[in-house]
Image: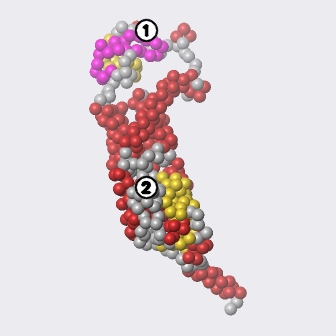
Amino acid sequence: MNFFNKIIFIVLAASAILFAQNKVYVAVIENEIDLGLAPYVRRVVSEAERENADAIIFKINTFGGRVDAATQIKDAIISTDILTIAFINNRAISAGSLIALSCNKIVMVPGSSIGATTVVDQTGQKQSEKYQSYMRSEMRSTAERNGRRTDIVEGMVDERIVIEGLVDSTQLVTLTSEEAYKFGIADTLANNLDELLAAFNLESARMIEIHPNWAEAVVRFLNNPIITSILIMIGFFGLLAEIKSPGWGVPGTAGLIALTLFFGTSYILQLASVIEILMFIIGVALILLEVFVIAGFGIAGVSGIILVFASLFFSLIGSDPFLDFEMVSNAIIQLSVSLVAAIILIIILAKFLPKTTIFNKFVLAVEEKKDAGFVSHSTSDELVGKKGVAITTLRPAGTAKIDGNRVDVVSESEYIEKGQKIKVIAVEGIRVVVKEI
């Protein structure tokens, strides 16, 4: 065998060993459990299945978070046939307990803990029995799936459940690592990932740690309540600005982009469905119809605004099984604050923007005064007091026929319908101001 053949043989042998080696994927679940974490977990499970991984390890260290997010993560974990291992390296509290229980195996670092899964509101107050019953059922069914004691996991939710030798009827169950191992909740204890791999005969496995990608980070960022409020505010600002001005411009485009980001994020995180998105599209279409086609502001415009508000509201509250008055009121407050902020922004820009240097770069600053010989219409002053007919809808600008001539005019009020009789009340430079008779 010559040197070249030896090189080929070594490369092929190394490749065969590499591809034959066991693969173990590692995902990190830490800090607050929110909806932005679910797409990341689903991607890890999908990649592990595609690569025929032997196991997926979920490193868990969390005090909990949103229950709807935890149930999405749980559903993703139990959907796979790959061996799933929860590695609790500090704590799996509240929603973190449900995620850990959804794994086939639980491994805990000595000194870690699991439990305390009672459903509470944002202020930490215990929710009603309706919510506790739902959570007990979720915990019990998840424990049954993986052969764990259902009474103990129910005791993590409900302090009334007595666990002999562990707690009485006044305490919630929160287990130390030793207690979890003793009562069969944890399968083994391990100080690190190497010991964990050895416990499941995966010492030779190649660990592949998956981190959230930029898209998942962006979605998680956009789901922040402050950011969603800003996106909604920009959306309101754009729509309001377009309603109050003729044509379509930058504010409307910015508003649509902001609301598209909002609904796109909500759809990815399963907060908004196709129904909410269709409601929003129909609402915007009705508003545009009112602005460009129908004179005035009537049923179409009002219906569009209602549909837009409803779609935003339902996308904020989502399908959380623990939906309560507080969540509804928070969504209403968030929408109201965003709308008020948009109105204030429009007022501020209308008042101060024309005085800024940046704005002046977009307009003609030189005045062509009448006393310097500049005139826009040789008989403009003579138009005062004359009557005519609006040949376009004045919103407030448009065209009228006066003395048989087409004249660009501006209405004194907001709208004058096409075909209405008008009268010239003032001529201010190039502006011919009219009112409806």
Question: In the image shown, does 338 or 280 lie closer to the viewer?
Answer: 338
Snapshot colouring:
secondary structure
In this view, 335 is above or below 117: above
Outermost residue, bottom side: 1
In the rendered image, the quadrant that contains the C terminus is: top left
In the rendered image, the quadrant that contains the N terminus is: bottom right
Residue 248 position within the rendered picture, expressed as x and y whole percent measured from the top left = 43, 34
Outermost residue, right side: 3
Question: In the image shown, does 245 or 95 lie closer to the viewer?
Answer: 95
**Secondary structure predominantly adopted by residues drawn in magenta:** strand
Observer able to see residue 204: yes
The residue that label 2 is drawn on is: 170
Residue 228 position within the rendered picture, expressed as x and y whole percent measured from the top left = 47, 43
Residue 117 position within the rendered picture, expressed as x and y whole percent measured from the top left = 45, 56
The amino acid pointed to by label 1 is Asp
Label 1 – label 2 distance at C-alpha: 90 Å
Q: Quadrant of residue 295?
A: top left
Residue appearing at x 49%, y 74% in the figure? 52
Observer able to see residue 56: no
The amino acid pointed to by label 2 is Thr
Mark 2 or mark 1, which is nearer the start of the sequence?
Answer: 2
How crowded pointer 2 is (Cα within 10 Å; few <14, some 14-19, many 20+) is rated as few
Magenta segment: 416-437
Badge number at residue 381 = 1
In this view, 194 is above or below 402: below
In this view, 294 is above or below 51: above
Is residue 353 found left or right of 292 in the rendered image?
right
Residue appearing at x 42%, y 28% in the figure? 245
Q: Nearer the viewer, mark 1 or mark 2?
A: 2
Residue appearing at x 38%, y 54% in the figure? 132
Residue appearing at x 62%, y 83% in the figure? 13
